Amino acid sequence: MKNLVSIADLSREDALYLLDNAQQLAQVNDREVKKLPALRGKTVVNLFYENSTRTRISFEIAATRLSADVINFSAATSSLSKGESLKDTAQTLEALGADAIVVRHPMSGAAHQLAHRDWINASIINAGDGSHEHPTQALLDALTMRQLVGSNDDLAGLKVLIVGDIRHSRVARSNVLLLSKLGASVQVAGPATLVPAGFEKMGATISNSFEDSLEQQPDVVMMLRVQRERMQGHYMPSEREYTQNWSLSGKRLAMLKKDAHILHPGPMNRGFEISSEAADDPRAAILKQVSNGVAVRMAVLHELLAGERS
Amino acid sequence: MQRVVLDSGEIARALKRISHEIIEANSGVSDLIVLGIPTRGIHLANRIAKLLSEIDPNFTSDAGVLDITLFRDDLVAADRRIQPTVIPGDDIDGKVVVIVDDVLFSGRSARAALDALIDFGRPKQVKLAVLVDRGHRELPIRPDFVGKNLPTAVTERVNVHLAEVDGSDEVVISS
C-alpha cells in the first residue's frame, strides 16, 4: 500500500489488517515508553488547506509516537496564500524531504490528484478532501465499534445509523463505504435536502425521520456536525427546525437501546445536532474515538512508510 | 534441493537440553522469564516454559511474547502485522529474560528484540536461546543457548517447521 486516498481502494482484508494493527498500537498508549522507533528518519508533512486542530494533532501525535519528524504546513501562514498551486507545493515539500504528505483540502479529489498525477513519489494520506472522503476517520470509527461490541473481526450484523448533514459529510461517505465492506447494515438519516440519493448505491438505506430510524433499534448512532462552511444556499429552513427534527435530544436518547453506542466525529455543537445530555451519556464513546484516531493513524503511517517498499 | 537437518526427536532433545542449560546457567528458575519472538519463537518459548516447569516445579510462569515488528530495520511488506506483546507478570525489572527465536542469522531480529525489551523495564540479564544458529552474523550478537549449530551458505534457506503451525516438527535446509 503506497497511499490512502479512499476507502474504496481498500479490500475488506486490507481494512481488517489495518484495524488489527491499530488495535495493537492502541495498547502502546498503556505503556510507560510510548515511543516506537519504526519510522525513525522519515518525515511526515501535514499539509492542511482547511483548518483542523484535532485531525492535525492526531496525525502529529501518531507520527511522533513512531519517531517520524513532523512538519506542519497550513494554508493561512504559507506561500499557499500567495497563490502557489497544489502541484508546486507538493513538489517543494518532496524536495525538502517529505516521505509522506497528509493532505486536507476543501476540494474533493485533491488527495487523489496528488497520489496519481505522477507529480511526486511521497505517500499521500487523505485527511479529508471536500465532501468526498476522510478514510482515517472511518477506520477509527470502525475500530471503536469493534472495541464496543468486542469483535476482533468484521462488524457483520451491526446496525449503524448515521444522522445529520449527510450531503456535505466526507465522514458519512467513508463510513458507509467501510462499514458496508465490514458487513454492517448502515442507514443514513437527515432532512431530504441534506441526504443525496447516491448513498443507496454505496450500500446504505435512507431515512427521512429520526424517530422511524430509532424505532429500528440501531446498535450505533453516529451524529454528524452540520457543515455550515460548505453550505452555499438554503439547505434548512432554520437552525431551530433542524434541532427540533434532527438533534439527538434527551427524548430521542431515551428511545435508544440500553447497550447502544453514540459516536460523533467532533467537533460537537452541543445543543445543535447533539444535546449535552447525549454527549455526556455513558453510552457516548466520543473520547474513545479520539484516542483510537491516534492508533489508526499510526497503523496507516506504519503501513505506508515502514521499511522498504517491495 | 531440500534436506532435513533436524527431525522431531532431535528438536525435542535440543529443547530439553536448552531448558536444562537455562536452569544451570541461572542456578535455578528464580526470577526467570521466557519470551518468544513471533511467530515460531512463541511456540518454542511455550515448549521451553513447559519443560522448565517439568524439570523444576518452582517455575510456574507461562512463556510471554515479544513482538519486534516496530523495532526492525529490515522490514519487508510481508511481515508488518503487529502481534501483541505479552510480559508474564507485567514486569521485567530485575528479572532474567530468555528471548527465544527459531533461527539466528544476521542478528538483526535479536537486536530489534533487545530494543523492544528495554522499553518495558530494566532486566537483570538478557539471554538468547535459538533452535538453530546458521551463522553469517551482521551484528556483534551471540546466542547463549543453541539447539544446533548449522553451517550454511548465505544463499541457502533454513526453515523451521513446528507442529503448532506447520503440522509437524522438522528443520529443513534448502538451496
Image (spheres, rainbow, N blue to C red):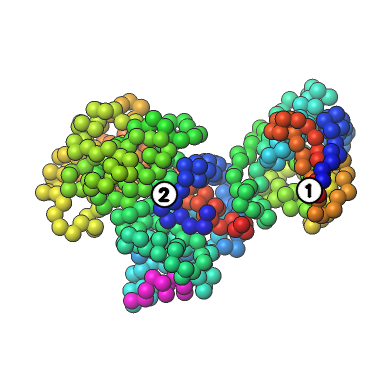
Are both tags, 2 and 1, on one chain? no
Residue at horizontal 17 percent and vertical 44 percent from the top: A192
Please state which of residues A127 and A279 is positioned toward the viewer in this rendering.
Answer: A127
Label 2 is placed on what type of residue?
Ile
**Quarter residue A254 falls in:** top left
Kindly report the distance in space between the C-alpha atoms of the residues bearing marks 2 and 1. Answer: 38 Å
Left or right: A58 as drawn, with respect to B171: left
Number of numbered discs overlaid on the protein picture = 2
Q: Measuring 33% from the left and 44% from the top, which residue is drawn there?
A: A202
- Is residue B160 at all visible to an observer of this figure? yes
Q: Does B135 sit left or right of A51 as displayed?
A: right
Q: In this image, A97 relative to A255: left or right?
A: right
Q: Chain of mark 2?
A: A
Which structural element holds mark 2? Answer: helix
Q: What residue is pinned by disc 1?
A: B157
Percent of width and height locating residue B143: 83, 46
Residue B166 percent coordinates (x, y):
71, 33
Does the magenta segment cover residue A92? yes
Q: Can see residue B16? A: no
**Disc assigned to residue A7:** 2
Q: Is residue B107 above or below residue A122?
A: above
* Residue at 68% from the left image edge and 39% from the top image edge: B39
Residue range corresponding to the magenta coloring: A83-93
Q: Position of residue B66 (x, y in %)?
A: 67, 41
Residue type at mark 1 is Arg
User: Magenta stretch containing residue B117, yes or no?
Assistant: no
Chain on which label 1 sits: B
Query: How far across and down, in percent of the image, does residue B61 sit?
Result: 72, 28
- Other-residue count near label 1 (Cα within 10 Å), few / some / many at <14 / 14–19 / ≥20: some
Of tags 2 and 1, the one toward the viewer is 1
Q: Secondary structure at mark 1?
A: strand
